[in-house]
Image: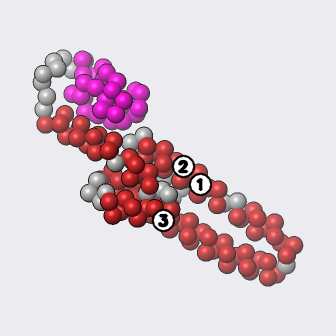
C-alpha cells in the first residue's frame, strides 16, 4: 500500500487516483499497468475509501459527547464509524469519570477550607485536555484516518 502525499490516506499500489483528493498517484505509473486493467483489490480499496468518505460526518459526531448515540444507531455497519464510535465512547466515559471525581474532590477540598480553592481550580484545568482530545478525534475522522486518541485511545 502507498500513502497519498496530499491527504495521507493509504491506497493499494494499483490505484491510479486518490479516491479522496483525486491526486494522481505515481505508484500506478511505476507499476507499468495501463488504465483499463483493474482487479479485485483495486475495487475493494476504492469501495473502502468511498465508505470512509461517505461516513465522515457520522464519525465526527462520535466525538461530540452524547451525540455518539447518533452514529451508534445510524451507521453501525461501517467499520470506519465503529472505530470512531469506540474512540468517542472512551472519551465520553473518561470525561464522566473525571467530572464525578472532580466534584467529589472539590467538595472534599472546599470542606477543609475555602483557601484551598486554587487546588480545585488547578485540577479543573484538566478539563481542557478533553477539548483537545475531542478536536484531535474530529480531525482524524474528517481526514479519514483510524488513529487512536493520545493518552486514552488505547484503553478499550
Quadrant of the image occupied by residue 114: bottom right
State the residue position of label 2: 135
Image coords of residue 12 (percent x, y): 25, 33
Q: CA distance from mark 1 to mark 3?
A: 14 Å
What is the spatial separation of the Cα atoms under label 3 and label 2, in whole angstroms? 16 Å
User: Closest to the observer: 5 or 22?
Assistant: 22
What is the CA distance from the residue labelled 1 to the residue labelled 2?
6 Å
**Nearest to N terminus: mark 3 or mark 2:** 3
Q: Is residue 10 magenta?
A: yes
The residue shown at (38%, 42%) is 144
Q: Within 10 angstroms of label 2, few (less than 14), some, or many (20 or more) residues?
A: some
Query: In the rendered image, which residue does mark 1 sit on?
Result: 131
Residue at mark 3: 66
Q: Residues within 10 Å of mark 3 (few under 14, many from 20)?
A: few
Dot 2 lies on which element? helix
Q: Most prominent secondary structure in the magenta stretch? A: loop
Q: Which circle, 3 or 2, is nearer the viewer? A: 3
What are the residue bounds of the magenta stretch?
1-30
Marks 1/2 in contact by CB < 8 Å: the verdict is yes
User: Does 103 sit above or below residue 26?
Assistant: below
Please tell me which residue lies in front, 58 or 84.
58
Amino acid at each position: 500500500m502507498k500513502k497519498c502525499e496530499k491527504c495521507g490516506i493509504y491506497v493499494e499500489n494499483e490505484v491510479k487516483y486518490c479516491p479522496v483528493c483525486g491526486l494522481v498517484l505515481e505508484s500506478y505509473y511505476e507499476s507499468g499497468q495501463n488504465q483499463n486493467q483493474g482487479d479485485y483489490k483495486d475495487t475493494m480499496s476504492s469501495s473502502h475509501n468511498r465508505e470512509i468518505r461517505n461516513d465522515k460526518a457520522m464519525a465526527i459526531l462520535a466525538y461530540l459527547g452524547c451525540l455518539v448515540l447518533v452514529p451508534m444507531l445510524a451507521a453501525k455497519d461501517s467499520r470506519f464509524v465503529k472505530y470512531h464510535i469506540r474512540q468517542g465512547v472512551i472519551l465520553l466515559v473518561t470525561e464522566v469519570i473525571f467530572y464525578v471525581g472532580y466534584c467529589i474532590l472539590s467538595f472534599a477540598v472546599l470542606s477543609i477550607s475555602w483557601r484551598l480553592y486554587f487546588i480545585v481550580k488547578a485540577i479543573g484545568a484538566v478539563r481542557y485536555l478533553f477539548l483537545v482530545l475531542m478536536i484531535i478525534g474530529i480531525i482524524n475522522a474528517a481526514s479519514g484516518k483510524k488513529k487512536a486518541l493520545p493518552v486514552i485511545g488505547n484503553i478499550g
